[in-house]
Image (spheres, rainbow, N blue to C red):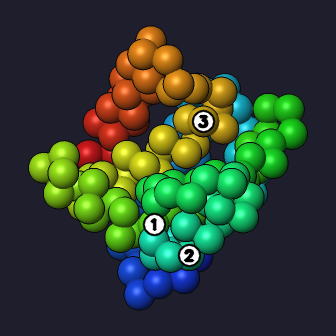
Amino acid sequence: MISFNYETGFTLDEETKVSQWISNAILSENLKEGDINYIFCNDDYLHKLNVEFLEHDTLTDIISFDYSVGKELHGDIYISIERVADNAKDFKVDVLDELKRVMIHGILHYCGFKDKTDDDAKLMREKENHYLSILN
């Protein structure tokens, strides 16, 4: 089950549509959907998590905690709406498009995709674009 939680004034439009899109992406990767929680927050909230759990004293747009068991995906995905908005400006894209990219990015990590090397990052971007094209 995919749930959306809000620690900021932001609310996601079309929760059902977005939830179904994420569920279909998981199935397309031949995995099972477990409990996946999206938590939308601000920079301060996510920065505290980044310092406390990852020992990174930096701002970030997303932190995901993967609790998957075998092929069943479970996890908490924290997204800073402020950071997503700033990144959207930098990349000259719509804020909601950038948010959806970040949302599917977290799921793709749970599916086993990495982005540390250039080749891995390229594949990750291709997968993001593929799933974004399905949603849009």
Callout 2 amino acid: Tyr
The Cα atoms of the two marked residues, 3 and 1, are separated by 17 Å
For the view shown, which residue lies furthest in the right direction? 69
Q: Is residue 47 visible?
A: yes
For this view, does 38 lie left or right of residue 89? right
Labels 3 & 1 near each other (Cβ < 8 A): no
Instruction: Report which quarter residue 17 is drawn in.
Output: bottom left
Q: Of the residues shown, which amino acid type is indicated by label 1?
A: Ser
Compare marks 3 and 1 and give the one earlier in the sequence. 1
> Foreground mark, 2 or 1?
2
Which type of secondary structure does the marked residue at label 2 adopt? helix
Label for residue 109? 3
Q: Nearer the viewer, residue 71 or 98?
A: 98
Task: Count residues near mark 3 (Cα–Cα under 10 Å), then give few for <14, some for 14-19, many for 20+.
Answer: some
Q: Measured from the top left, where is residue 6 in percent x and y?
A: 53, 80
| Closer to the camera in the image, 132 or 114 | 114
**Residue 45 shows which numbered tag?**
2
Q: Image check: 75 left or right of 126?
A: right
Q: CA distance from mark 2 to mark 1?
A: 8 Å
Please state, as top left, top right, bottom left or bottom right, where the N terminus lies in the image: bottom right
Marks 2 and 1 close (CB-CB < 8 Å): yes
Instruction: Tell whether 115 sits left or right of 75.
Output: left
Q: Nearer the viewer, mark 2 or mark 3?
A: 2
Mark carried by residue 32 = none
Name the element at disc 3: helix
Mark 1 highlights which residue?
Answer: 80
What amino acid is labelled 3 in the image? His
N-terminal label among 2 and 3: 2
Q: Please identify the residue farthest to the left as the structure is shown.
A: 92
* Residue in the image at 26% along x and 62% along y: 86
Q: Is residue 112 above or below residue 98?
A: above
At a point 19% along the width and 46% down the height, the residue shown is 91
